[in-house]
Amino acid sequence: MLTIGSHHLDNNLILAPMAGITDLPFRKVCKQLGAGLSISEMVTSDQRLWQSRKSLHRLNHVGEIGLNAIQIAGTDPQMMAQAAQICSAEGAQIIDINMGCPAKKVCKKAAGSALLKDEALVANILETVVNAVSVPVTLKIRTGWCKDTRNALSIAKIAEQSGIAALTIHGRTRACRFKGCAEYDTIAEVVQRSNIPIIANGDINTPDKAQFVLDYTGADAIMVGRAAQGRPWIFSEIDYFLKTGVYQKPPMIGDIKKVIVQHLTELHNFYGEFLGVRIARKHFGWYLAHLPQGACYSSQFNSLQSVTEQNSYISSIFQNLDENERLAA
Ligand SMILES: Cc1cc2nc3c(=O)[nH]c(=O)nc-3n(C[C@H](O)[C@H](O)[C@H](O)COP(=O)(O)O)c2cc1C
């Protein structure tokens, strides 16, 4: 169990913030399937952009299951503090600060992982945001900007001194982007020398990898991102394994159908038909990767233009499958 400020989570499994993926519908599904916490997709701290369709969706947490944690990104301490204040007034129970995003668009504005190069600014942002809100503030970083400037340890010290309630570390530098394998030595070192909860992140994609990363780093919790795409039940699989030491049986095809139908219905309702149908395509494509002969269905599904067509196509796929069969392990 992980504690963040005054919040006690049901477990130590967290869905990673992923822009364009971990929207409200996906967060709900993951939480129902065992994620103890999810962090929303990042929103810019620049409130002048909050009326855009993208920001409005990202700021919409109506009906969030469990804790409402919003991630903000930016470089100006006062702007970040104001954004945090508004989010918490609107119901955010945790504010997460993004200093891990490697995207050029974000780093060009010296935000996201680019901030790791400027420790004085990091301290200024963290202190200003922490002092501006009464809810816990958490921070998400990479291990550093590049392999020669792996400064996670000193950022962690700054975080601790600034009153950050938990720190997530993705085991790659900004220069690594998503290449190579995540390394956990830096995370382990930070855990050893920190007095705040540390959340390990990067390439955790199976229950035993989760167990390995927890053991190897000594982290208080783990965060899972890409491995949950099309497989949100990974949280209950990991939870079960961590608690019992044995693998949970794979889900039945019928259970997966229920998850998909609920997820896509939520997407259609949340975004409306035009956008919902388009966003459903990528999620359904990820689900298909786990279903028998799933790949055969993706191009036809992607050509469908309406909610009705998508729903009836999904029903027809499952008519050809045995709903009582379990997914291959
Ligand atoms: C498509 C995509 C979008 C992401 N968006 C964010 C984001 O908005 N904020 C953030 O802190 N990290 C973001 N990340 C990084 C993830 O939170 C996570 O650190 C990274 O994917 C490594 O974890 P994983 O190996 O479990 O996927 C994103 C990653 C991906 C793949």
Image (cartoon, rainbow, N blue to C red):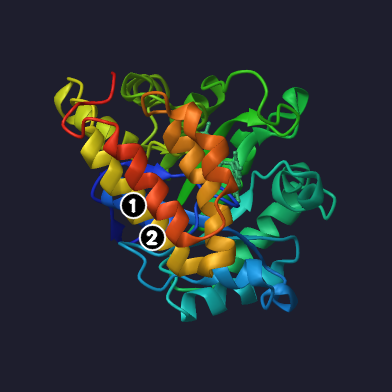
Give the number of callouts: 2
The one nearer the camera, 111 or 164, is 111
For numbered disc 2, what is the local secondary structure? Answer: helix
Can I make out residue 164 in this image? no
Residue highlighted by disc 2 = 265
Which residue is painted at 41% across and 24% down in the image?
293
Instruction: Give the residue number, with chain letter if any, for mark 1.
Output: 261
The kind of residue tagged 1 is Val
Other-residue count near label 1 (Cα within 10 Å), few / some / many at <14 / 14–19 / ≥20 = some
**Ligand 1: image quarter:** top right
State the residue in front, 182 or 18: 18
Residue 230 horizontal/vertical position (percent): 43, 38
Res 191 quadrant in image: top left
Residue 42 image-quadrant placement: bottom right
The image quadrant where one finds the N terminus is top left
Report the side of 271 relative to 197 (left or right). Answer: right
Q: Is residue 233 above or below residue 64?
A: above
Q: What SS does tag 1 mark? A: helix
- Does residue 251 appear left or right of residue 99 in this picture? left
